[in-house]
Amino acid sequence: MSRAVVFAYHNVGVRCLSVLLAHGVDIALVVTHQDNPKENIWFDSVARLAALHGIAVITPDNPNAPEVVEQIRALQPDFFFSFYYREMLKKELLEIPKLGALNMHGSLLPKYRGRVPVNWAIIRGETETGSTLHYMTEKPDNGDIVAQQAVPILPNDTALQVFQKVTVAAEMALNHVLPDLLAGKAVAAKQDLGKGAYFGGRKAEDGVIDWSQSALEIHNLVRAVAPPYPGATTSLLGKPVRILQTLQTRCTASGEAASFYVKEGKAYAICGSGVLRVLSFELDGIEMSAEKFAALYGETRFEFNR
């Protein structure tokens, strides 16, 4: 029986840990994160799943600390698996497992290496993404690929919807390759790093809408940061606005200022080029419908504040 130490968090961590358990892998230890009370915890708990199966759990601030490294080395694992764990593992840790350290990444590597790959793929208008199991090196997301599973990104999919697909893709990729991996028969392929790029993390302020962009670009931003993420933000009538859901339209508004209006019970936003239908939005923290907005402010066209 192969022994593993698992570094995991989030839904991908829960589902991939479940795959390891289903295949009879001896999980000697789970390393996870303490939930941040300032973060919107909308996902499942790796720690809870591990406790259910009687697996020891630790939540170090730094997994590369000498005492953590020694604790893990003493377990003599065959494998490391990292499933949406947020800290980089350094060389001293990566050299411990006899048969290798593997990470599950939420993109079709070598594309979208780095942070929040699902959100970036939507922002950049991709029609496909997926999950990739690869060997870990000291450089993020650049090791040899062991398994990969693609999923579609539909034109109106939000980041949450795509992330749910990517979670299933991760489960499928791991479940398919794990028997060969445990038997030492898995075939690994080198990445062509020139076919992808590295992307950094995103902050709430990165969701501020640039109304000079096209309707398609703004639509992609809105769905990429829709709840449970912070949402796309702007300002209207001197008040903060969150645009939560949009649809593209065939309307044109050449040369008109970026603005918001209600017509026949439907809300619209004029963009740098093109017009978006606004299906869901908040004004000054209050959920607002097109009808409610029109009742309060009329059907006048209001320019977005810059």
Image (cartoon, rainbow, N blue to C red):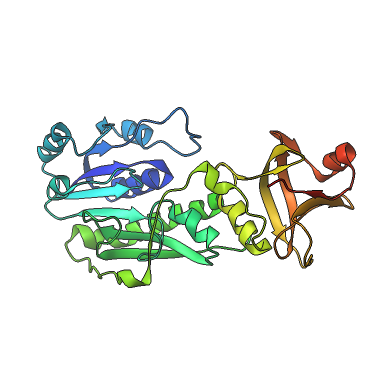
Location of residue 153 in the rendering, given as x and y in whole percent from the top left corner: 54, 63
Question: Residue placed at 64% from the left, 61% from the top?
Answer: 213
Q: Decide if residue 165 is in sight here.
A: no
Left or right side of 142 for 14: right
Against 153, residue 242 (above or below) is above
- Which of these two is toward me, 249 or 102? 249
Name the residue furthest front.
306
Q: Position of residue 149 (x, y in %)?
A: 40, 64
> Which quarter of the picture shows residue 268?
bottom right
Q: Residue furthest top?
A: 37
Q: Residue at x 87, y 43 (%)?
A: 294
Could you tell me if residue 47 is visible in this image? yes
Q: Position of residue 244 (x, y in %)?
A: 66, 46
**81 with respect to 232 (left or right):** left
Name the image quarter holding residue 254: bottom right
Residue for point 45% across, 27% down: 37
Answer with the quarter of the image where residue 297 lies: top right
